[in-house]
Amino acid sequence: MARSDARARARRTSAPVERTPAGDALSLFAVQVLRLAGLLIETGDALAAPAGQTSARWRVLAMVEHGSATVATIARTLGQARQSVQRVADLLAAHGLAEFDDDPDDKRAMRLRLTARGRATLRKIQAAQRVWADAVGAEIGERQLRAASTTLARVTDSVARGEDENQSAHAPRSRGS
Amino acid sequence: MARSDARARARRTSAPVERTPAGDALSLFAVQVLRLAGLLIETGDALAAPAGQTSARWRVLAMVEHGSATVATIARTLGQARQSVQRVADLLAAHGLAEFDDDPDDKRAMRLRLTARGRATLRKIQAAQRVWADAVGAEIGERQLRAASTTLARVTDSVARGEDENQSAHAPRSRGS
DNA sequence: CGCATATTGACAGTATGCTGTCGAAACGCT
DNA sequence: AGCGTTTCGACAGCATACTGTCAATATGCG
């Protein structure tokens, strides 16, 4: 069967093997998630802009709305690198929206806390977010949103499990060429 | 009714008005989308890393897989700024994965095209993506993914319409403090 | 208690993506 | 044909987020 061997080899090297229907569905789903995420960040920036803030600063403000927290804790909760949050927290402090206190339990750590001005700023953003969320939510419908949220959670779990496996295998990710 | 006026005012300034159930559902949905998007970018980087690439470079490679295109066209299709794509395209060209040709129809424009090496690199990434997509897709199920995709598309349309309204109203977005 | 390990914040460097602006070229409408 | 508008790539600057490294401090185990 030299002929079909050659064809199979040519197919492997010149065109990708096709995905399963479920794989196709997931790929489409992933592209849509990425695209919507971009729009949501834009929208978040727009909601926070009248208060002079951005999505990133809003997220950190919201994390300390109900009680202070260390930068490292906030970063873990948000699933971000410590330094990303540290940078934003320093900016918020520089603009008087938050302040650092010593952590009585840890001499290294500082606890981030909202100032009165930070709280007022957060309230303003939240009010704008409520109008937006209610409007879009009403258009889509609660039932459909809850159903999609369930799928989103399942995919997130599945993808995160895959990531964990790679990490536990001691494979530090590399970048660049 | 001075008493109830005062209470209403206090409520407005000290606590956010509650969202509708649909607004809550949308807010939860949005948070999940953002979180999954982060995971998907990580996964994309991991899939592209063995080929020495990243999510961003992979996206641009894929855009010119079936025929060349100008940077501006690619940017519009991806929903990104022209300069983000230009930067990546220049990097791909510098690494020999793609090349620029003059556009016979437009003296300003350059058409980006895959080199043989770029095509081989893309094939390698696609092979890894197929394995991943088929595995996760099988775990979630095609039906549920398609259903969630429909909701995702509806939300994307709704949010994008809101963005358009702001833009058509001549309201350039501002940043920073 | 003492030492290996983990955590915390600081510093440095890089990748991705956005906005604004400019000159050149293309397009559209009169 | 001519002129205003849009589109294209180039250049500059900023925001967000990641990685790696270091010293100081906490923590856990023998």
Image (cartoon, coloured by chain):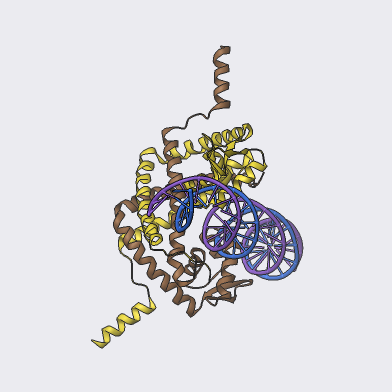
Chain colours: A yellow, B brown, C blue, D purple
The reply, left or right, for residue B8 in relation to residue A95 is: left
- Position of residue D10 relative to residue A8, above or below, is above
| Rendering quarter of residue B166 | top right
Foreground residue among A60 and A169: A169
> Which residue shows up at 36% across the image and 52% down it?
A155
Q: Which image quarter is the C terminus of chain B in?
A: top right
Residue situated furthest bottom in the rendering: A2
Q: Residue at x 41, y 39 (%)?
A: B25
Tell me if residue A124 can be seen: yes
> Vertically, is A82 above or below B128?
above
Residue B1 lies, with reference to residue A165, above or below; the image says above
As rendered, which of B176 and A109 lies closer to the eye?
A109
Q: State the image coordinates of residue A19 (x, y, percent, origin top left).
A: 33, 66
Residue D16 location, x and y as percent? 57, 51
For the image, the number of numbered tags is 0
Query: Residue B163 or B134: which is nearer the viewer?
Result: B134
Q: Quadrant of the N terminus of chain B?
A: top right
Q: Residue furthest left?
A: A1
Give percent across and percent down for residue C15. Answer: 56, 64
Q: Nearer the viewer, residue A33 or D4?
A: A33
Residue located at (44% from left, 32% from top): B20
Residue plotted at (43% across, 57% down): B40
User: Residue B99: image x %, image y %?
Assistant: 56, 76
**Residue B160 seen by the camera:** no
